[in-house]
Amino acid sequence: MVNRRPPSVTRSTWWPKTWTSAHSGRSRSWAAIIAQCAAGLVLYVTVSFTVGLLSGSPVLGAAVSGPVVLGAVAIWRRRTFGSGASRPVSEQAREAGFWVFALAGLMLCFLGGQSLAVWLYAEYGSPVFDAAQSAQSAVPVALLLFALVVAAPAGEEALMRGLVYPLLRRRWPVVVSALVSSVVFAALHGNPVQIAVALPLGMLLAFVYEHVGRLWPVIALHALFNLASVLVPVHLVEAMATPVVFSTMLVGAAAALMMLYPARSDGEREKKTSSPQT
């Protein structure tokens, strides 16, 4: 979600048994994967739309749907993985350098995505984005901040990184799963201006999730991203809204993603963790 301003564990050497069972049999079928992804998306859209329609405030719809989806996905993850984590934390994510690159990538995604969004808006406009901005300006600041910094990050990350991404990973490699889940994540925002912001962010968060297997780190990063959209001066983003600047920022974000890419494939990690300790 873009703000109201201009688009501006425990260490373990064994895979949990529930991780193996969750990846076997019917749970790996495309029918099961698509059905579960669709159920999450329908829940998110239905709650958001219904509350927004009844209250007359799409912002309130987002504020309610976030916690609802987070709770539903948390239950699903407990039933599927046996805990809130889908896998052990990777060796890369145990090092401080990983989080330095994650934060640097987050900053570059923010500056590149926001400046591209401003440029797109200036060039082509967006009635849907204008309507979203109008709805945000009509609600109390406290509700808007809750929706932007708490509810939206919690609900969107639960849906996309907590449900859709791990389901896609049952059949697809990291990059494809990250790209598809990020495209769905971006499309939920409903207009090109916000899609420009959401797409690079989605890729970054998918790569981070691949390493940590938990929701709270990606929720925190998403919340930080949305908070920056409130705090960063509008004129700074507008000054950067040129093809040269946003292209440079997005190339830098891509470089950060390369540094965050898992060092080993799932097969290699599983082989290592399934070997007896010596």
Image (tube, helix red, strand yellow):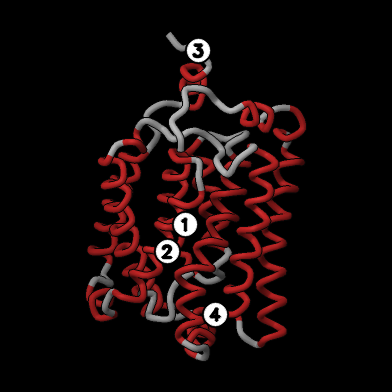
Residue 198 drawn at (x, y percent): 45, 62
Query: Which tag, 3 or 2, sits closer to the chain's start?
Result: 2
Query: Which tag, 3 or 1, sits closer to the chain's start?
Result: 1
Q: Amino acid at mark 4?
A: Val
Q: Check the picture and name the quadrant holding the C terminus.
A: top left
The local secondary structure at tag 3 comes to loop
Q: Amino acid at mark 2?
A: Ala
**Crowding near the residue tagged with mark 1, few <14, some 14–19, many ≥20 C-alpha atoms within 10 Å:** many
Residue shown at the point (33%, 56%) measured from the top left: 106
Left or right: 170 with respect to 240? right
Q: Are marks 3 and 2 in contact (CB under 8 Å)?
A: no
**Crowding near the residue tagged with mark 3, few <14, some 14–19, many ≥20 C-alpha atoms within 10 Å:** few
Q: CA distance from mark 1 to mark 2?
A: 6 Å
Left or right: 252 with respect to 154? left
Viewer-nearest of discs 2 and 4 = 2
Residue 80: quadrant of the picture:
top right
Residue occupied by mark 2: 223
Q: CA distance from mark 1 to mark 4?
A: 26 Å
- From the viewer's side, name the closer residue of 89 and 28: 89
Q: CA distance from mark 3 to mark 4?
A: 54 Å
Residue shown at the point (57%, 45%) measured from the top left: 165
Disc ID at residue 128: 4
Residue occupied by mark 3: 275
Query: Which tag, 2 or 4, sits closer to the chain's start?
Result: 4
The local secondary structure at tag 4 comes to helix
Q: Are marks 1 and 2 in contact (CB under 8 Å)?
A: yes
Q: Amino acid at mark 3?
A: Ser
The local secondary structure at tag 1 comes to helix
Q: Is residue 242 above or below residue 88?
A: below
Residue shown at the point (70%, 27%) measured from the top left: 24
Residue occupied by mark 1: 219
Q: Is residue 70 above or below residue 135?
A: above
